[in-house]
Amino acid sequence: MSNKYREFDINFGLEGRTALITGAAAGIGQAIAVMYAKKGADIICFDLHEAPETREAVEKCGRKFLQITADITRDEDIKNAVKTSIEEFGKIDILVNCAGIGILEKIEEVRDEVWQKTLDINLTGSFKMTREVGKEMLKAGGGKIVCIASQGGVVALDRHVAYGCTKAAIIQLVKQCALEWARYNINVNAISPTIVMTALGEMNWNNEAGEAFKKTIPARRFGYPEEVAACAVFLASDAASLINGANIVLDGGFTIG
């Protein structure tokens, strides 16, 4: 039997890999892009917005950076992004589905357009990107896919109906893809964080409501983008080859009760 599954880089290196990351211009996506670059990966940033800070950090690591300014809800943008990535790098070794929105409303007040937009970006966009990149990974003989879900996809949270439903569906999408693609050396996994203190997280939760929420978390704190990125590094590394269809919950114990 081959020893390749036992002789992986114990430093979880990603040298020579190419990673396409949606939502990499800021927040968790940016943190993952930077940590991947520090581990040796070249980065493709798929985002609605330009990402000069991400580019600077990636290139400072000596890695290549490709900006694709595009919309995850547009089929043509997804297909063109994958085509451009293959033309530029010859392969996509890693996909991270991080692009997403969270608009919080009471169930009886949820507007149809908010429901549809959340579905289109969080779920349908992730599915279509996974499908297109998955085709290339099937041709190449393998790959790693990491989807950013949420604790809101595991347990019910107040005013999270649209967001929570899409994140629960992401967790199921991961299981379905793993079931069909594991035999082709493709690993598909999810990460479900608690509230993460990105710039947006700081703005929304650095207040009394945030302090009250922390008291419901056994660890008594929120997460940081770098902690999610560290998990994403592990899942994209050869060390995680036996992990498939899993949902890694990073929530300080919030969902264990």
Image (cartoon, rainbow, N blue to C red):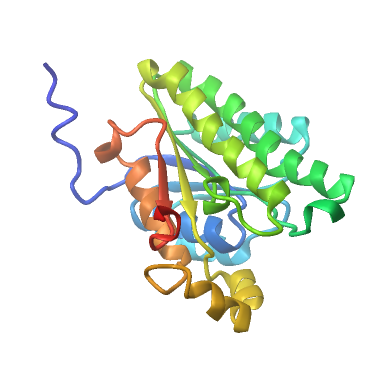
Image: 86 above or below 42: above
- The quarter of the image holding the N terminus is top left
Q: Is residue 154 or residue 172 the one in the foreground?
A: 154
The percent coordinates of residue 86 (x first, y second) are 55, 30
Judged left or right of residue 64, residue 6 is left
Image: 54 above or below 110: below
Q: Is residue 99 or residue 190 the one in the foreground?
A: 190
Judged left or right of residue 182, residue 193 is right
Quarter holding residue 25: bottom right
Image: 108 above or below 247: below
Say which residue appears at 21% left-offset and 51% top-offset: 11
The percent coordinates of residue 125 (x first, y second) are 69, 37
Say which residue appears at 14% left-offset and 20% top-offset: 2
Say which residue appears at 48% left-offset and 33% top-offset: 92
Say which residue appears at 57% left-offset and 63% top-offset: 27
The percent coordinates of residue 249 (x first, y second) are 42, 50
